[in-house]
Amino acid sequence: MSLNLFAGISVTDLATAQGWYTRLFGAAPSFFPNDVEAVWELAENRFVYIEQRPEHAGHTLNTLIVDDLDATVVGITERGLTPSSTETYDNGVRKITYTDADGNETGFGGLPA
């Protein structure tokens, strides 16, 4: 099975959210399909987009599994964001969650280095 992903996050203000997600993902958006969306390609055929939809903002929960969680967190910290929570599960997997201004949560998970 081939897997592609196009995950959406509703935000109140596109410009504010674009700046925050640029710091979170470490890159500017890959493209803008229209005036109310910005899209990041995080890996081949795996996209996350923000869309200005104030009436739906603040309800998204996403977790991205990464190869090197420590390096990912260091990069995000260097770009000025602080985790809203940190969890370690019984099997050693860790999850570091960041929360945008609307309350949407994006977690990064992985095994310790």
Image: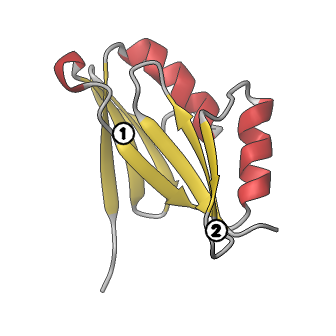
Residue 88 position in % (x across, y down) = 65, 60
For label 1, the SS is strand
Please report the residue visible at 63 percent of the width from the left and 30 percent of the height from the top: 23
Q: Is residue 97 above or below residue 20?
A: below
- Mark 1 → mark 2, Cα distance in angstroms: 26 Å
Residue 9 position in % (x across, y down) = 33, 36
Mark linked to residue 1 = none
The amino acid at mark 1 is: Tyr
Residue 49 position in % (x across, y down) = 36, 39
The amino acid at mark 2 is: Val
Q: Earlier in the sequence, mark 1 or mark 2?
A: 1
Mark linked to residue 49 = 1
For label 2, the SS is loop
Which residue is at the far front? 90
Q: Is residue 102 above or below residue 43?
A: above
Identify the image quadrant of residue 46: bottom left
Q: Is residue 25 left or right of residue 53?
A: right
Please report the residue visible at 56 percent of the width from the left and 43 percent of the height from the top: 97
Residue 76 position in % (x across, y down) = 71, 37
Which residue is at the far left? 55
Please report the residue visible at 33 percent of the width from the left and 60 percent of the height from the top: 5
Q: Is residue 61 left or right of residue 40?
A: left
Please report the residue visible at 78 percent of the width from the left and 55 percent of the height from the top: 70
Q: Is residue 83 left or right of residue 47?
A: right
**Residue contact between numbered discs 1 and 2, judged by CB atoms under 8 Å:** no
Which quadrant is home to the C terminus? bottom right
**Between marks 1 and 2 in the image, the one whose residue lies nearer the viewer:** 2
**In this orientation, which residue lies closer to the viewer: 84 or 33?**
84
Mark linked to residue 93 = 2
Which quadrant is home to the N terminus? bottom left
